[in-house]
Image (tube, rainbow, N blue to C red):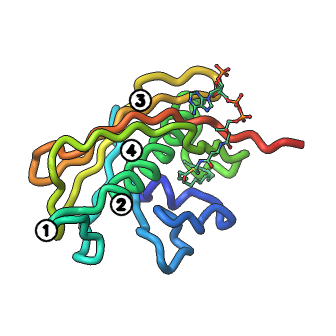
């Protein structure tokens, strides 16, 4: 199964969080299935936060950032009846705002599950609800306003 990011054109594949062409990046891969999207990431020890054994909050925000914009793009394609990677003009979303709530410490070294759902899609604006869980417990929640990017002439 192809990830949503696998359909990003080469010029957009340098994203630190999810670009396949960035050798220093996180290479997050997001998938759409039914009414939700999901991605998985196992943070290595280098992503330690301030106290041992737990993940740095900025990394967690980064994971939500990339997963949220991928979620917005995937649902926008669906809303327009288009297939991802259909060769037409890309529908590209950027983060307008991202609110992150850290509910409990997130452990290092185990696989994290990041999930997204579409709350609303109106015009260029998509509101995405996000969660990040470890071992079935929600550690972080997020709310993103993703805005469809339109190149200015
Ligand atoms: C599935 C297949 C896909 C195929 C191909 C896809 C191509 C690949 C594409 C992409 C790869 C993406 C790689 C992942 C990216 C990871 C996430 C990031 O790191 S993104 C970087 C960080 N974000 C920025 O740098 C944005 C910086 N900001 C801006 O550029 C502008 O402010 C922008 C585009 C967000 C809006 O600017 P305006 O001039 O275009 O439009 P205005 O009118 O200001 O806003 C539109 C609407 O949104 C609201 N809005 C904008 N920002 C808001 C905010 N912060 N809070 C609340 N509302 C906001 C406004 O109030 C307005 O709403 P009203 O239409 O009036 O109802």
Q: Earlier in the sequence, mark 4 or mark 2?
A: 4
Measured Cα–Cα span from mark 4 to mark 3: 11 Å
Task: Name the foreground residue: 112 vs 5.
Answer: 112
Q: Earlier in the sequence, mark 1 or mark 3?
A: 1
Measured Cα–Cα span from mark 4 to mark 2: 22 Å
- Give me the residue at 50% from left, 57% from top: 5
Q: Quadrant of residue 123?
A: top right
Task: Write down the residue under mark 2.
Answer: 59
Q: Residue furthest bottom?
A: 23
Residue 131: horizontal and vertical position, in percent?
A: 27, 41
Graded by Cα atoms within 10 Å as few (under 14), some (14 to 19) or many (20 or more), the crowding at tag 1 reads some
Q: Quadrant of residue 80?
A: top right
Q: Could you tell whether 45 is left or right of 128 in the image?
A: left
Proximity of marks 1 and 3: CB atoms separated by less than 8 Å: no
Q: Identify the mark at residue 32; answer none if there is no mark.
A: 4
Proximity of marks 2 and 3: CB atoms separated by less than 8 Å: no
Q: Nearer the viewer, mark 1 or mark 3?
A: 1
Residue 88: horizontal and vertical position, in percent?
A: 71, 46
Q: Could you tell whether 54 is left or right of 23 in the image?
A: left
Task: Write down the residue under mark 1.
Answer: 53
Task: Write down the residue under mark 3.
Answer: 118
Measured Cα–Cα span from mark 1 to mark 3: 32 Å
Graded by Cα atoms within 10 Å as few (under 14), some (14 to 19) or many (20 or more), the crowding at tag 4 reads some
Q: Could you tell whether 5 is left or right of 143 in the image?
A: right
């Amino acid at each position: 199964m192809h990830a949503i990011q696998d359909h990003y054109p080469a010029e957009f594949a340098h994203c630190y969080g999810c670009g396949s062409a960035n050798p220093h990046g996180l290479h997050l891969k997001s998938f759409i299935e039914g009414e939700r999207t999901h991605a998985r990431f196992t943070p290595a020890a280098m992503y330690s936060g301030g106290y041992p054994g737990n993940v740095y909050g900025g990394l967690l925000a980064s994971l939500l950032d990339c997963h949220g914009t991928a979620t917005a793009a995937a649902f926008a394609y669906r809303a327009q009846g288009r297939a991802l990677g259909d060769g037409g003009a890309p529908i590209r979303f950027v983060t307008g705002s991202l609110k992150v709530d850290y509910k409990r410490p997130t452990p290092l070294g185990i696989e994290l599950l990041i999930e997204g759902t579409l709350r609303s899609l109106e015009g260029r604006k998509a509101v995405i609800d996000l969660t990040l869980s470890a071992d079935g417990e929600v550690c972080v929640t997020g709310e993103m306003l993703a805005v469809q990017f339109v190149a200015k002439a």
